[in-house]
Image (spheres, rainbow, N blue to C red):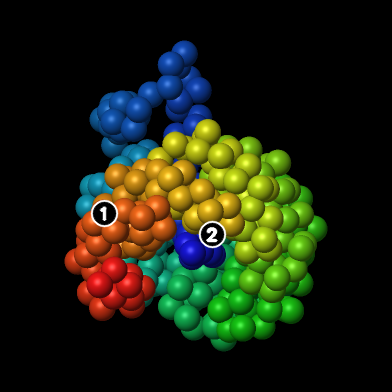
Amino acid sequence: MKFFTFSGLLFSLVILVSCHSSEKNTARETDQPLNVEQLILRVSEKINSNPNDDRLYIERANYFLTIDSIQSALRDITIAIDINDQDPNHYITLSEAYLALGNPDRCIEGLEKALEIEPKNQEALLKKAQLFLIMKQYDKTYETIDELIKIDSYNPTAYLTRGYALLEQGDTIKAIRNLQTTIDQKQDYFEAYIQLGVVYINLGNPLAADYLSNAIELRPNSPEAYYLLGMFFQENDEPDKAIEIYNNILAIEPQFTFALYNLGYIYLVYFKEYETAAGYFTQTVELDPNNYEAYYNRGYCYELLGNKSEARIEYQKSLELKPNYELAIKGLNRLD
């Protein structure tokens, strides 16, 4: 059965958020939204007219970061700092560039410089705490979060970050408290509802459905929220509800392979509708040709339908993708 949590993904979403307000402001100046390349061109024209405006270089650097043109971003950030080395936001942008390069140590250096200029800069402190979490330096994570909350106790993302750290260290009760505080402070915090849903799924607690339903209300087109809710119903032997949820996902994102796979699993295990199940596994491998479990399950459907030759092909394919896969080996042994 496929099951995965979204905590890692969600944390990436939290920490990689950058302040690109300039992009929004620029785009509103025209009737039609501009793409990033057009925005870069527009800022470049402004730079030609105002070559000593450090903010313009940072604006262009942020655009470069959105298209993963990291070296171009670094050049602009360096120019901006040469013009004005006392703006903490320049160093925060520099840290984002180093994060994109996978260099957390240089990222920390940038944030430390921002805090040297402005010790109570909340954005820098938050990013610093999140980086310590990525680096699994939990004591430093908590220390930085505590410092941030002393400055402003209303900081939902700080509590969310501390909740992630506590989960990684296995302190579920304290993690739940911090995640709930996140929601208490910001009732539309999608990621907090998702993470609490994941926590309660792992605890086998029906509160998972409530939190995930709230997440869906906030983002009705989020396949991730639907998927987790579907998994909750599937894990709790409510296949009809799970099917409804997975079909909702496919209406939003027809190529969401996890939903296709789990539909196949449900029809195979719960309803014994082997042809229907095989069809879903076929769709899964068409989109994900390396899914050895889907090949195995399709083979098992064929075996149950009495088509041993096709079952053998599927088991062999599963073993090609994952040698020594025990279920596939047992499947072949059953056919001999």
Q: Which of marks 1 and 2 is nearer the N terminus?
A: 2
Give the residue at the far right of this rendering: 184
Residue 23's label in the rendered image is: none
**What residue type is disc 2 on?**
Val
Residue drawn at 45 percent across, 27 percent down: 26
The one nearer the camera, 240 or 69, is 240
Q: Where is residue 296 in the image (x, y as percent from the top left)?
A: 34, 62
Q: Seen from this angle, which residue lies furthest top?
A: 31
Q: Is residue 113 left or right of residue 199?
A: left
Dot 1 amino acid type: Glu
Residue 196 on image: x %, y % = 68, 63
Q: Mark 1 points at which residue?
A: 310
Q: Is residue 225 above or below residue 172?
A: above
Residue 317 x/y as whole percent: 22, 61
Which element is circle 1 on?
A: helix
Say whether residue 89 is visible. no
Residue name at image x 62 percent, y 58 percent: 234
Q: Assess disc 1: are there few (<14), some (14-19) or many (≥20) residues with their C-alpha within 10 Å of its C-alpha.
A: some
Which residue is at the front of the view, 239 or 69? 239
Residue highlighted by disc 2: 269
